[in-house]
Image (cartoon, grey):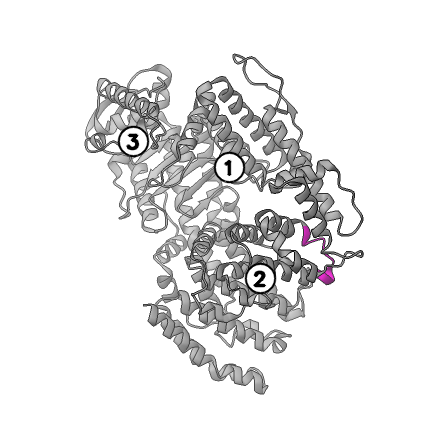
Amino acid sequence: MVENKDIALDPEAQRLFAQFGGLEAYRAQTPVVGTAHMTQRLLEEQKRHDAVRKLMVQAIWLISRYLADDALALETRRDLRLVEQLAAVLSRLGQTGGHLGCLLIRFRGTPPDPELPAKLDYELVAGHTLVDSRLLPAMARRNGDGWAKLSDQLQDACMVLADYGVNNIFVRLPADGAVPAEPLRVCLKILAGFRRARQDGNPILVRTDNGQRAVPLVNDENLFPDPNLTVLAGLNRLGAAAMANLVDKVDRWLRQQAAQSALKRYAGVYSAALELPKVRAKVRRPPLELNNVKWLLTETDDQDVSAEKLDIARLAVNLAAAAPQQVARMIQSVYGDDYGRIDTRLLGQRLHLSSNMLQAADRRPAARDLGKAVLGNLQLRLDQVKDSVIDDIHVVEAQNRAPSETPSADPAAVHKDIFRMVSFYKGRSTARKKMVGMVHQPIQFSLHDYTILAKDFQIDRAAAETLVRTLKGCFDGQGRFLKRAFAEAVPLFRRYEQKIFHFLWHHMKDVVLPADRTSFLNALQMLTTRMDQPKKALKILIEDLCSDPDAIQFSDNKAIMLANLILHRDKSITDYDMTPEDVVLSRHGIDKQVVQYAAWRVAKDQEAFAAKMRAVHRQLVEALHLGQTGDRKLPPAFLLNLERELFIFFSMVHCDAGKAILCSAAIEYGDPTASIYHQNHSGNCMGALLQNLRVALRGMGCVGAMPDVTLLEGIKVHEETFMRLKKDPQYRAQARMITEWVDEAIKLIRFRS
């Protein structure tokens, strides 16, 4: 039975949701100045996103009620209440903006909590906003005990989805935000009865306020009952014969397209039919789809999926037969974007699944190209796996089997080509360890080591020997870093910029002697300016910065500075120890493509960036109070500069998350009563604190809007109070510039508006 629960936002969530109309609405309710920490303001920003995440969890819980109870296909009173609640939740979600037209519930199978069964691990995606079981405890801590039930709701929904056999659910969110309840109701009633109909083969009886109807169970082109074709029939009142005729015609057309090697491919008859103008003109598109393999490959309705991906997805569907979660796992084994984070157990599973797909491709002459595609994609992803995981993985080469035989059941047995690939990466891990070890002690490289490195860098063996010798020459006999030797080696390193930067950043920065760490990171700065493909270096830096957002590393400062250097591409600032703040005002050197990528990454990882900013500011206040942080012994100057570099980064990367951070910074740094100015060691850092205020104001000038002008004007009235914070002529001269800094920011905003 379906529980009679009202799904409604509590008053706090309602307030946060109302604020999601835009930053301006949020700022209008925020005092111009105050003593609240920047961390608290960033927390409020996260709470606004939490309000949207709560809607997403409520939506999937309501949908799951239909999948859990086939009696809802014939009931009208209970289900009307459910669908009205769902339509209201989806309408609110549609009004938030940034959802890219859909809510996607997708099986992932890689639970962050080892105690959670893999079959219950789903992720909810709406644009750049993501929810999973990992985020919900943090949301509850931020918003109070009333939010704790969300974890239970999500797990309850995931249990239903796993039992039903769901690998994805796609829900359309109209641009105007209004979700009609009746079409949604019909779709959900059909899905409520679909599983029973699939078992007994009978039509699905659906009852609404307009009466009862029988919806035919519709098979796809492979003669499997298809939930989306069945929903299409029921929503448009199409009979069994009409649907069979439609499936047959579209299937024959698809076969003709494939024979002619047409560039456009489709996930199946259902997806193809809805893109044909004649069909689209006569039928209503369902507002909800279930297990459409297309949504395992993309997250937006307007993005084309490559022919290769669709062919591999169809191969996975054929192999997995009636196991939807297995289809998702197979596709993840080829196209997963998390290989840099997976552990040995999950890697072993994916190698086994990829091997099954390769063996299936070997059995089909027409699918041999798919085997090459599987190997090519797998190699790109194995290149990202941590060496420690590669070291621990155990695989054996599967014995040659007859084409008619099923794949090996041994989880360690992999296709011969995958076995060779894993063996190569194990060899590369060994060679890398030797390259790191040679800094401090003599290391003997074998011919096999050089052969491995040559293959990794796509060079011949002699060039690999030269590369190792040159890298060794950047350190003396005592392991001290030689900056001049590195500078002379930059032209050679530049030839292999993608591989060498990854190696230097991930493997060398932590083994350099502490006395040489700054010189080494400055040398990387010099290498960065010579790169032809800086986006990949930026990806490495951002991923490292956000890998543990609650912790502050010594390298974080240089990581974000290198990122700023990559964004601006101004070689004249290569030798600076920190990014000149004038780059905030100069847009001429901005690499627009790299900035677009950075904005996408910030939006995608907004939770991690917000957590990183809170951690930096929290430790800054601690260092200002104690003279250094209690754990890593980081001084205030280091943290002030790190925060400053982050402000510059967000000033160049235009995105909502960056705007919120800069707004929070301007509010706190622009308030002379804020705690950052009144800690035990604040007096020694007043110049740096005002410099951060100036950078935050310039950032607001770059990304702010006209509603922000009132906020900025309010900072000017505190200039005299700032002057009284420290009796130092140089500091007071700096404080007298606050009005000028504010006017400069306002002028920039008005110019852009």
Sequence-earlier tag: 3 or 2? 3
The local secondary structure at tag 3 comes to helix
Checking the image for residue 336, the label placed there is 1
Label 3 Cα crowd, 10 Å radius (few <14 / some 14-19 / many 20+): many
The nearer-to-camera label among 1 and 2 is 1
* Image side of residue 465 versus residue 584, left or right: right
Using the rendered view, name the quadrant where residue 556 is placed: bottom right
Q: Give whichever of 502, 559 is nearer the camera.
A: 502
Residue 321 in view of the camera: no
Q: Is residue 270 magenta?
A: no
Checking the image for residue 616, the label placed there is 2
Question: Disc 3 marks which amino acid?
Answer: Cys
Give the labeled residue for mark 3: 187
Question: Disc 2 marks which amino acid?
Answer: Val
Sequence-earlier tag: 1 or 2? 1
Position of the C terminus, as image quadrant, is: bottom left
Label 1 Cα crowd, 10 Å radius (few <14 / some 14-19 / many 20+): some
The local secondary structure at tag 1 comes to loop
The local secondary structure at tag 2 comes to helix
* Measured Cα–Cα span from mark 1 to mark 2: 31 Å
